[in-house]
C-alpha cells in the first residue's frame, strides 16, 4: 500500500473514530495489526482516537468484537503499550461479560491476546526485548 494512501486512511480513521461502533473499532485495529508498515506508521493521535473509541464502545461489544479488539491490541505493540488502565479495565470487563457466550475461537483469541501481553511485559522487565 503506498505511503500516501496509508496516510490518507489513517486521517480518515481518526476522523471517524468518535462515531465508530464496537465492530468498527475491532475491525480497524485488526486491519492495522495485519499491515506491518501501516501499524509501524500509525500516528499517536490515531492510536489515541481508537483507544478512546474502544473504551467508549467496550460496554456494547459482543463476544467477537471483544476477542478481535484484544487480539489486535496484542499485535500492535505501540498501541498496547499506550493503553490506559481505564481502557484495559473496560476491555477486561467486556471480556468477562461476554465470556459465557463466547464460541471456542473467541475464547482462544482472548486467551492468546492476554498471553501475548503478559509475555511482552515479562520480556521488557527481564531486558529481553
Image (cartoon, helix red, strand yellow):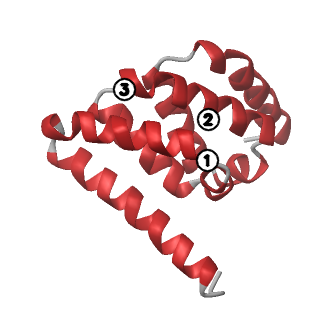
Instruction: State which quarter of the image contains the C terminus.
Output: bottom right
Q: Visible in this render: residue 69?
A: no
Upstream in sequence: badge 2 or badge 3? 2
Asked whether the beta carbons under mark 2 and mark 3 sit within 8 Å of each other, the answer is no
**What crowding class fits label 2: few (fewer than 14 Cα within 10 Å), some (14-19), or many (20 or more)?**
many
* Residue 61, numbered label: 3
For disc 2, the marked residue is 51
Q: Secondary structure at mark 2?
A: helix
Image position, residue 59 (x, y; %):
39, 24
Q: Secondary structure at mark 1?
A: loop
- Picture residue at 25% right of the left edge, 34% below the top: 97
Give 126 or 9, whichever is nearer the viewer: 126
**What crowding class fits label 1: few (fewer than 14 Cα within 10 Å), some (14-19), or many (20 or more)?**
some
Left or right: 12 with respect to 54? right
Image position, residue 96 (x, y; %):
27, 41
* Residue 92, numbered label: none
Question: For residue 17, which quarter of the picture?
Answer: top right
Q: Is 82 located above or below residue 119 in the figure?
A: above
Q: CA distance from mark 2 to mark 1?
A: 7 Å
For disc 1, the marked residue is 83
Q: CA distance from mark 2 to mark 3?
A: 14 Å
- Picture residue at 69% right of the left edge, 24% below the top: 13
Left or right: 59 with respect to 64? right
Image position, residue 76 (x, y; %):
60, 53
Asked whether the beta carbons under mark 1 and mark 3 sit within 8 Å of each other, the answer is no
Q: Secondary structure at mark 3?
A: loop
Asked whether the beta carbons under mark 2 and mark 1 sit within 8 Å of each other, the answer is yes
Amino acid at each position: 500500500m503506498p505511503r500516501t494512501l496509508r496516510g490518507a486512511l489513517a486521517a480518515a480513521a481518526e476522523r471517524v473514530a468518535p462515531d465508530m461502533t464496537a465492530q468498527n473499532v475491532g475491525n480497524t485495529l485488526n486491519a492495522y495489526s495485519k499491515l506491518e508498515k501501516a501499524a509501524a506508521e500509525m500516528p499517536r493521535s490515531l492510536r489515541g482516537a481508537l483507544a478512546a473509541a474502544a473504551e467508549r464502545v467496550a460496554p456494547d461489544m459482543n463476544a467477537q468484537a471483544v476477542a478481535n479488539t484484544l487480539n489486535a491490541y496484542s499485535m500492535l505493540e505501540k498501541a498496547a503499550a499506550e493503553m490506559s488502565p481505564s481502557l484495559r479495565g473496560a476491555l477486561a470487563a467486556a471480556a468477562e461479560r461476554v465470556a459465557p457466550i463466547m464460541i471456542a475461537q473467541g475464547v482462544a483469541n482472548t486467551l492468546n491476546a492476554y498471553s501475548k501481553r503478559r509475555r511482552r511485559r515479562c520480556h521488557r522487565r527481564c531486558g529481553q526485548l
